[in-house]
Image: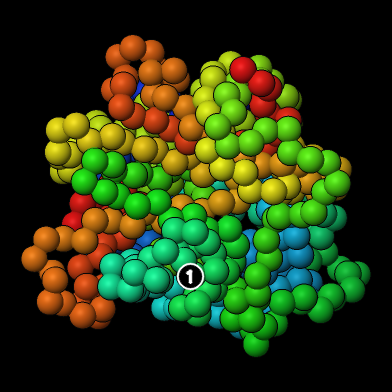
Amino acid sequence: MAHDHHDDHDHHHDHEPGQHPPSDMELRVKALESLLVEKGLVDPAALDAIVDHFEHRVGPRNGARVVARAWTDPAYHARLMADATAAIGELGYDSRQGDHMRAVENTPGVHNMVVCTLCSCYPWPVLGLPPVWYKSNAYRSRAVIDPRGVLAEFGVTLPSGTEVRVWDSTAELRYLVIPERPAGTEGLGEDALAALVTRNGMIGTARL
Amino acid sequence: MNGVHDMGGMAGLGPLAPEAGEPVFHHRWEGRVLAMTIASPTRSNIDAGRHQRELIPGPDYLAMTYYEKWFRSLSELVFKHGLATPEEIARGRAAPGFEAATPHLQAAQVETMFATPGGYRREVAAAPAFKPGDAVRGRNLNPPGHTRLPRYARGRTGEVIAWHGAHVFPDSHAHGLGEDPRHLYTVRFAACELWGEAADPRDSVSLDLWEPYLEPA
């Protein structure tokens, strides 16, 4: 396809990835949507429902629930580590972009961190859509070669002797990091524990 | 293809810049682009969609935001599938004489669609060539089309740590050559094997790699 209708993007070159794009995107996207609706190719109400799904129905609260259950229920923990897809399905979360899940667990000597160097693969059902930094050229390029430097920029200092395991999501497996349960939380129930679990903790760029 | 999208191990590609309290979408149009990409008839092949984004010229790819890339590739796919011309896409109006289709995804079907398991594992007759514990090397492949074997793993030796059965093979599927399922493995590479002696000897990077990407080591 000719790129003649994209020749107005030169001004994109003077901003960094992650910055807000020019407002003409709103117009161009609106034009495409109008066209697809006019041709009967998309249902605008379905688009509303998809946006609503990502804004309100999926997100890191789902993953936090999985982690809290694993912390409090040894049998669930065992099922999660053996077959994460089935164990996450037990809690009723969607499967799209999470058809093949794998849980990787932080322990006192091991820290896990997830990236997709080739695009932006991310476990939608348990974490929602990825943040801009996860999709950034900086994270995608550096996470595999300098995970400790990346962690330091996130303010994470690992105890000496810790092994870092990076998982590059090159196929349709999707990775969920199970953070270490914070000390002093022995008396907390599942809801209170879930509230302690952060999105970055489940990507591996934070410790709890 | 050896494009700029294959950026694992590069330096100098800007700041990480995590944003506190980040919204799901920064602009309304971003949500519409994502939703159109999912709802459009062009959605049927996730590997073709990924490859379309890889085809964005490198200088543009590096400068564009995430959803700008999605918009560009959606526009190209709508054209490639014969659903609209570039002129129609730019104008936002159909040329006269078209016959309206019926959207294949209706609003009431959206939540069911998200909840319906898809999955990429397929049964194949061939036995897997490798098993956990085997030493394998990433082959030195430089295909002109789509692949999920990053450059940084080519020629490097690692250990199979898991076998996942056969999965749809993106190198074929992205190019309309069918699902062509191949055995899939998780392979762990020592950081020092990938990046040299300066890497931390404790660290590793694991990738999910299809059998055609691997040879015995």
In the rendered image, residue A53, in percent from the top left (x then y), is placed at 50, 76
Label 1: how many Cα within 10 Å (few below 14, some 14–19, many 20+): many
> Which of the two residues, B56 or B146, is positioned nearer the viewer here?
B146
> Which of the two residues, A94 or B3, is positioned nearer the viewer here?
A94
In the rendered image, residue B52, in percent from the top left (x then y), is placed at 68, 43
Q: Establish if A18 lies above or below A73.
A: above
Quadrant of residue A149 in the image? top left
In the rendered image, residue A185, in percent from the top left (x then y), is placed at 13, 69
Return the residue at label 1: A88
Mark 1 residue type: Ile
In the rendered image, residue A152, in percent from the top left (x then y), is placed at 19, 37
> Which of the two residues, B125 or A2, is positioned nearer the viewer here?
B125
Residue at 25 percent across and 32 percent down: it is A148
The quarter of the picture where the C terminus of chain A appears is bottom left
Instruction: Inspect this view and state whether residue B109 appears.
Output: yes
Question: Callout 1: helix, strand or loop?
Answer: helix
Quadrant of residue A141 in the image? top left
